[in-house]
Amino acid sequence: MKRPNIDTLFLTIVVLYLIISSFLSIDLGSAQLSSHTALNAFAGLFRPDWGFVNDGSREDLLSLLLLTLGIAFLGTLIATLISLPLSILSARNIVPSYGIVPRIGKFVSNILRTFPELIYAILFVTVVGPGPFAGILAIGVNQIGMLGKLYTDEWESIDHAPVEAMEAVGANFWQVLFYARIPQIGAKFLSLSLNHFEIALRSATVLGLVGAGGLGAPIIFAIQSRNWSRVGIILLGIILTISIVDYVTGLLRKRLM
């Protein structure tokens, strides 16, 4: 029988020690469970406040859902438009003569996608003030990093035979780009953007927690005031909206692929 490697055994012991010590360091003594509060919460969630759906105040559920959709769409649109040129500069097979340029482009994408949208939302609320514009910028900046990385991977995985054929007959950079590269991956780019629009919609629902528009603020206010019927109708609206968007974008992706 093969004896276990000493390094592997030592690493396993260290990992187990870290996991156990991390679990033991969690303070569970402060956790409190009230059956009365839990029952009230569940009862309220299953009795949605239908009057909040559309009361004409422009702060109702329908208006806030439309606002959330707008934040997600514009954020994704901005990210798509900026990610395209960034990914071209980041792809080694497109700008091979400028070795430092792809490294800089990939570094920028890595930095931008490091922080979640909520962190960006806090920063932009401070810079441009509270409101949906801060949410759009937060989603856009984060998605630039995400889409920039995915677009770059697609550029670098294309079939080079059409590119070499066009270069052999004297085609310039832009002709090769539009007639040999983009036709191979244009549909994939649109599919990735649609997928990230779904992700942005989920993110936009919580950006209001920090004042960046959307449904986050009404949710937290309803929870703090124990208005579980209001929480129930908001959650129901979010579930229905995301389900519809997922279904529609899924159909579009199938048509593109």
Image (cartoon, rainbow, N blue to C red):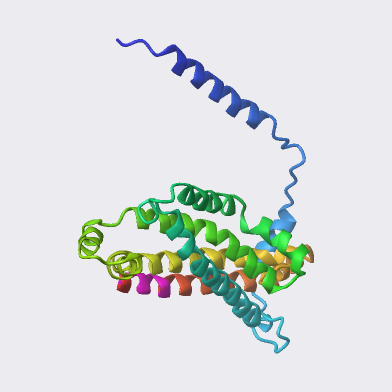
Q: Which segment did they paint magenta?
A: 248-254
Q: Which quarter of the image is occupied by the C terminus? A: bottom left
Q: Which quarter of the image is occupied by the N terminus? A: top left
* 7 magenta-colored: no
- Residue 71, position in %: x, y? 60, 73
Place residue 46 in its image quadrant.
Answer: bottom right
Viewer-side residue, 229 vs 144: 144
Secondary structure that dominates the magenta span: helix
Q: Residue at x 74, y 43 (%)?
A: 31
Q: Which residue is drawn at 53% across and 56% down?
A: 145
Rendered view: 103 above or below 89: above
- Residue 48, position in %: x, y? 64, 75
Viewer-side residue, 4 vs 159: 159
- In this view, the residue farthest toward the front is 170
Q: Is residue 228 visible?
A: no
Viewer-side residue, 120 vs 159: 159
